[in-house]
DNA sequence: TACTTAGTTTAGTAAATACTAAACGTTCAA
DNA sequence: TTGAACGTTTAGTATTTACTAAACTAAGTA
């Protein structure tokens, strides 16, 4: 007899939860996304609560994070106070918006601190070997971060990342 | 009067700790790397303990993880039982080995679970709209993961990623 | 107006993770 | 063969993070 769709869905959801955790997001987030991703219709918050087994509070906060990252979209219907959510299906678009979101957070702050180190070294310059050595190392790291930064910016700038662009990158890397 | 190098180093170390945490690694890891990265000479475990303020146990386990990722290198000297560690300075090489390392861990397992979902759907095929819908969605995700996978594999295959290749990618993305 | 139904916030708990302290196993040296 | 110097492992603690339960706010309805 055919394995029930319900069961397969559940297994898929668990897989996405794992992936979510792997990327440093709560596993509940992965579960919420999975449920929405496999649903042909947009779901209300309570429906998501039912499907995932999480509480309203958790779903409420985590779905907001998902929306901020552009992985789900919220919509409302006329004459219905409920909000409805559906999954973004264009993953390339999602990557771009995740990058965008991350760009302006802790990461940027931390990277800036490396640049500040470099500036401090310049301002308080002392002519000796160790100072020179440290300066060169910090500078090299700075250059690396700058490269990563221009890469992410370039990706964000694209209207679509898409499989086509991935293929183009692949051909260059050959 | 010039700000002391010691203090600048400490600030830099804190910055890297933050970055480390951002990428989902323990902040101690970032600190250890920072200390090694700013040291002109290879350091022993106890020296790292002294510089970071962590305990021997923590440094021991975390530096092993760093070595596995190719971010630090361990070496030993003749007639000296201590191990010495130094930072990898080629970040592109480091990225490659981090990708390599990650490739064979939880992530791969999780991604495989998506493929398994797809197979289960095929094996137990039932002709109805929802089944069809779910199948298409899971398939789309699978294709996306495959694209990401070939990207990382391509990067791993390169002898050097380097700034040159980054620039080539950038030019394609224009 | 009070009552429902929705989503959010908050205070507290559970679970996961990073870390410490100390015991342990090895290796070398006296 | 005992002891010291290293690095590792382990058991327990502290910190962080994810989540629950329940109070709360807002908006529509009777």
Image: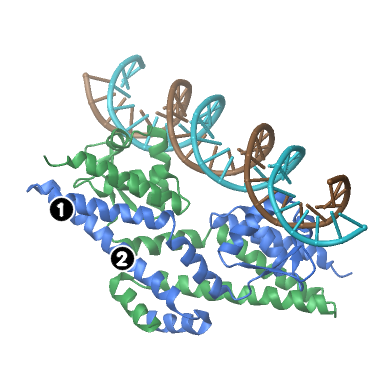
Chain colours: A green, B blue, C cyan, D brown
Q: Give me the residue at 38% from left, 46% from top.
A: A17
Residue B21 visible, this orientation: yes
Q: Where does residue D25 sit, x and y in percent of width and height?
A: 45, 30
Asked if one can make out residue A75 in the rendered structure from this viewpoint, the answer is no
Disc 2 is placed on an element classified as: helix
Figure quadrant of residue A157: bottom left
Q: Quadrant of the C terminus of chain A?
A: bottom left
Residue drawn at x 35%, y 60% as measured from the top left? A94
Q: Is circle 2 on the same chain as circle 1? A: yes
Cβ atoms under marks 2 and 1 closer than 8 Å = no
Q: Residue at x 21, y 39 (%)?
A: A6
Is A60 above or below relative to A147? above
Give the quadrant of residue B45.
Answer: bottom right
Q: Nearer the viewer, residue B51 or B44?
A: B44
Q: CA distance from mark 2 to mark 1?
A: 18 Å
Count numbered badges in the picture. Answer: 2
Which structural element holds mark 1? helix
> Left or right: A85 with respect to B108?
left
Q: Which residue is mark 1?
A: B122
Q: Nearer the viewer, residue B112 or D2?
A: D2
Is A15 placed above or below B6 here?
above
Q: Residues within 10 Å of mark 1 (few under 14, many from 20)?
A: few
Q: Is residue D16 above or below residue A127?
A: above
Percent of width and height locating residue A88: 29, 55
Judging by the rendered image, the residue that carries numbered circle 2 is B146
- Pick whichever, A163 or B38, lies toward us: B38
Q: Position of residue C2 (x, y in %)?
A: 34, 14
Q: Nearer the viewer, residue B12 or D3?
A: D3
Q: Any mark on residue A67, and which?
A: none
User: Quarter of the image containing the N terminus of chain A?
Assistant: top left
Give the x, y percent position of residue A51: 28, 36
């Amino acid at each position: 007899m055919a394995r029930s769709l319900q069961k397969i869905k559940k297994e898929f959801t668990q897989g996405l939860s794992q992936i979510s955790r792997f990327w440093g997001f709560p596993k509940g987030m992965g579960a919420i996304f999975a449920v929405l991703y496999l649903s042909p219709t947009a779901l209300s918050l309570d429906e998501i609560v039912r499907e995932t087994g999480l509480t309203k509070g958790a779903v409420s906060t985590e779905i907001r994070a998902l929306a901020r990252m552009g992985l789900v979209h919220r919509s409302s219907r006329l004459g219905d106070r409920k909000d409805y959510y559906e999954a973004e299906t264009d993953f390339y678009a999602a990557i771009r918006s995740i990058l965008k979101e991350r760009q302006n957070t802790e990461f940027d702050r931390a990277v800036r601190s490396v640049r500040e180190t470099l500036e401090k070294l310049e301002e308080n310059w002392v002519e000796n070997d160790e100072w020179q050595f440290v300066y060169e190392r910090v500078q090299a790291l700075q250059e690396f971060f700058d490269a990563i930064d221009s890469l992410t910016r370039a990706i964000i700038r694209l209207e679509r990342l898409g499989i086509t662009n991935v293929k183009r990158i692949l051909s260059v890397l050959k």
